[in-house]
Image (tube, rainbow, N blue to C red):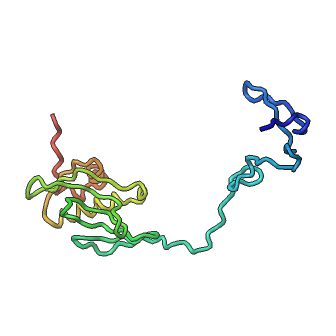
Amino acid sequence: MRQPQPSELGDTEDLTVGRRAVSRISRRSVNGAGHQPKLPTDHPNRSPHGAPRRKPPSRTAPAASRTTLARPSPQERTVAGMNDQISYVHAPGKHRYEIRDGETVAGFTQYRLPDDEHVDFVHTEVDEAYNGRGLASGVVGFALADVRAAGKRIIPHCPYVAAWIKRHPGEYDDITDWPRPRG
């Protein structure tokens, strides 16, 4: 391929960028067709001045912002929220209480049964897509109420469950057996 001659390129000016000297070619193209190079401000998500473009306002009405709780049953409680239907469900076959968004499991609190009297909570987790909605707190509250209704006691090995009980003093102190320190 033939290299264009400086006379074919049009006007140039020397610039210093960092430690290197470079030549910038004017906007006239090699073949004279007047090709305009794309500038950083030609980005589709930027205004001509380089600022981010604002999204146009939504034309749909906002979803209801109310949160309602159905009457809790021993096995399930539903929370109607923004655009999803969240429910708390006891899954005894998996030894956990689940947070469900329709058919999707959005999180859970896992337990084990060390004896006939206790439910030992060992782990709580919520999918990142559902963080910040208070769902972990909801499923733990649901699980502890279910344990109380079953006439059992709680052992909070899970740090989240332990912190939840401490944030709600007096609610479950009567059925909580704190784990013994190791050592």
Location of residue 21 by image quarter: top right
Name of the residue lying farthest toward the left:
116
Q: Is residue 23 left or right of residue 113?
A: right
Q: Quadrant of the N terminus?
A: top right
Percent x, y for residue 155?
Answer: 18, 51
Location of residue 174 by image quarter: bottom left
Identify which residue, 174 or 142, lies in the foreground: 142
Percent x, y for residue 158?
Answer: 25, 49
Percent x, y for residue 179?
Answer: 17, 45
Q: How many marks?
A: 0
Name of the residue lying farthest toward the front:
1
Identify which residue, 107 or 132, lies in the foreground: 107
Q: Is residue 138 left or right of residue 14?
A: left
182 versus 62 height, above or below: above
Q: Is residue 138 left or right of residue 33?
A: left
**Residue at the image position 46 percent from the left and 70 percent from the top:** 83
Percent x, y for residue 130?
Answer: 41, 59
Q: Quadrant of the C terminus?
A: top left
**Residue at the image position 89 percent from the left and 47 percent from the top:** 32
**Residue at the image position 16 percent from the left and 51 percent from the top:** 177
**Residue at the image position 87 percent from the left and 34 percent from the top:** 5
117 versus 38 height, above or below: below
